[in-house]
Image (cartoon, grey):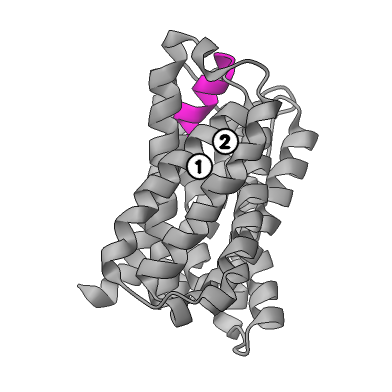
Amino acid sequence: MNAALPVLLPLLAALVYVAGVLLAKRSAELGVGIWRTAFISNLITAALFALLLPFGGTFHADLLWQPALVAVFYLLGQLLNFVALQHGDVSVATPVMGLKIIFVAVFTTVLLTTGVSLKLWAAAGLSSLAIALLNRTDGGAHQHIGKTILYAGSSATMFAIFDVLVQKWAPAWGLGRFLPVMLGFVALFSAAFVPLFHAPLRTVPRAAWPWLLGGCLFIGLQSLIFVSALARFGGATTANVLYSSRGLWSVVAVWAIGHWFKNREQQLGARLLRWRLAGAALMMAAILLVLS
């Protein structure tokens, strides 16, 4: 079973992520706002990561700058992701986030001593092509697609650097020290969001709270699953190819059960569906290539 965990955990995180963003998207439509969403999400995520403390490790007071720096990249990635979701559709923002795979492969080569195999480069390339096909539109189905792609792509860059730095620095600290400390910094830095709230938390509509808390819980949980797998098993490029399946799951979820979340994205037409099915096939090919 342990040998399967590096594969199963990123795939599980991808599914949990899609549920989280659908819930968060709905809370955004109810007027919660980016800064309040990010603040609540970070507090919940920090609490979840504190569950890793019993796994132990070594605390390095002289290296506190490492988790602090990683926390900055996490915050930037998170904020840009929420901005992308606020401006556009889940079925656009989530597939574009898959560009993170290419960035991880690049930063792995630049920042780590180990390179990336030709097989992984091929899988990353297939996944990126799949993202392009999954992201095709019929010209009228998506809101602010340019801004959505820009923000989601920028978020992918920040999260790619985050992933590689976790893989680089977490082993010296241990699973139960680096990640809880890093998320502690994230929660601490999130205090800077409070002055940016467009209204106090007490004014969040009652109808928005279940969507907000559910979305933040699922987003924090998927982060816990994915980042723990990364810190424990390494293999940032492989994990991200598997995790990129969230682009496929997001399209399927919006099409099949989006109405459960009162998602307003239109149903896919036959022509658009064919393109996205082709993208799904390429995504699966990338995953199978990693697993072979």
What is the residue that sits farthest to the bottom in this orientation? 113
Q: Residue at position x 77%, y 43% from top? A: 150
Magenta extent: 21-31
- Looking at the image, residue 36 lies above or below residue 57: above
Which residue type carries mark 2? Ala
Left or right: 21 in relation to 176:
right
- Is residue 224 highlighted in magenta? no
Query: Which residue is identified by label 2?
Result: 38
- Looking at the image, residue 144 lies above or below residue 94: above
How many angstroms separate mark 2 from mark 1 (CA)?
6 Å
Query: Which residue is identified by label 1?
Result: 42
- The quadrant in which residue 18 appears is top left
Locate the N terminus by quadrant: bottom left
Q: Residue at position x 50%, y 14% from top? A: 202
Image spot of residue 91 (x, y percent): 57, 35
- The quadrant in which residue 257 appears is top left
Locate the C terminus by quadrant: bottom left
Query: How many numbered discs?
Result: 2
Q: CB of mark 2 within 8 Å of CB of mark 1?
A: yes
- The quadrant in which residue 66 appears is bottom right
Badge 2 marks a residue whose secondary structure is helix
Badge 1 marks a residue whose secondary structure is helix
- Looking at the image, residue 15 lies above or below residue 105: above
